[in-house]
Amino acid sequence: MSETLERWGSKRAFILAVTGAAVGLGNIWRFPYVAGENGGAAFLLIYVAFVLLLGLPVMMAEILIGRAGRRGPMQALGVLAADAGASRHWRWLGLFGAFTVFCILSFYSVVSGWSIEFLVASINGNFQGVSAAEIGAGFDAFLANPALLTFNHTLFLAMTMSVVAAGVAKGLERLNNLLMPLLYLLLLLLAGYATTTEGFGTALAWLFLPEFGAVTPSVVLHAMGHAFFTLAVGACALMAYGAYMPDDQSLPKAAGAVAVLDISVALLAGIAIFSVVFAQGMDPADGPGLMFVTLPIAFSQLPGGSLWLSVFFLLLLLATWTSAINLAEPMVATLQGLGLRRSRATAAVALSVWLLGLLSVFSFSFMADFRPLFGRNMFELVSSIPPDIFLPIGGLLIGVFAAWVMPRTTAMQALGTSERNFYLWQNVLRWVAIPLTCIVLLSALV
Ligand code: PFF
Ligand code: NA
């Protein structure tokens, strides 16, 4: 394999690719339901703080390693460690990242499959004029149908892996370019609609007036895990994208732009969804089904609702698609680094993710009560442990590598910014991000 990889077409293309990786289910589906289960405003505040104090500096560290190494994650870490005179074992961090995205992609694909089903149902007008109770019951019936879930999971994974097989090519760059602004616009419209519902005031209070009495170590852990998850940080997935970053781009500016976009998408989605939840007297702690029930309910009573809902699910699907491609990339890159051809590597990843995904599929029907760990079933396990525990551990190690192991000159050059900014970043990483991650992880473990 050649040591000089291809590059993103432009600075903007890099920002869009990373935004495509970041903005996905995490913002629109996971944020509202995890916030719902963890008390709302206090969770939101802690999560935003974590994005800025941990997620952002670690994101820069991760992209920086990719850019300095210009190889797949495992190889980049190995080469940079050797250059720094450190242990070659650092390369196993790349493998750990690949394992993390393996788990994440397995449930990500299943849930993204739901949006395919809902897109088709909205286009067919299946929600128009249907009562809230019936929509809720319809979703439960859908989950209880493993064949249907498997079909949509398969379809989504095929969509993802066919793009990955072709290389993360210009096609996706262009698609992102066009669709991310549209997604944003639609969310703005949705939030605008939310202001007209009776639940809007309650939703704002619930999202923005924190009650810190309810904050437990577990709430803090979830907020930290979600900060990593939503930025796509901690699994070496952005490291893979950093390897193709243009030479003359400022990394802090790019990462900062992505973080701001990512937070604002989550906020808009949260406002829209919780307004409907409260207007309908539903329970904000309703779990993974939250978005798939509230949005159809919100639109079912609106003129032209089917059209809006179709557009929304289409955009959601595209947002998850660009994230899933990013999730698959480090696995494929790792296998390629071990000598497999890209086509073979892609096929192997597709098959194993598909199989693991079946466990999530069945968790809504006949494996619902198979609870091997912590009283959680397989879907609950893969959708919580890798995001909440593996990503912070991976992020921690990535931060340690960039802040303590890499030689200053290498890191400074790869960050592509002034000396002052470099030290600011390094100090935040060394004295805030790394210790804070350790403390939260440890306090959650005990
Ligand atoms: N950031 C994505 C989201 O919010 O949906 C999920 C994700 C992508 C997590 C890539 C981790 C990752 F490596
Ligand atoms: Na996100």
Image: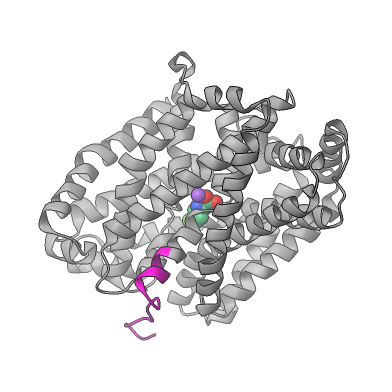
80, above or below 272, in the image:
below
| Residue located farthest toward the bottom when viewing the structure as drawn | 2
What x and y, as percent, mark residue 45? 42, 30
What x and y, as percent, mark residue 355? 70, 59
Q: State the residue at coordinates (24%, 55%).
A: 402
| Residue located farthest toward the top when viewing the structure as drawn | 213
Q: Is residue 2 magenta?
A: yes
**Residue 41 in sight:** yes
Q: State the residue at coordinates (33%, 52%).
A: 256
* Of the pair 116 and 312, the residue shown nearer to us: 312
Query: In the shown orientation, is residue 112 left or right of residue 171?
Result: right
Q: State the residue at coordinates (26%, 54%).
A: 401
150, above or below 39, in the image:
below
Magenta residues, dominant SS class = loop
* Of the pair 169 and 177, the residue shown nearer to us: 177
Q: Is residue 341 magenta?
A: no
Query: In the shown orientation, is residue 5 left or right of residue 314?
Result: left
The magenta span reads 1-15
How many marks overall? 0
Residue 443, by quadrant, is top left
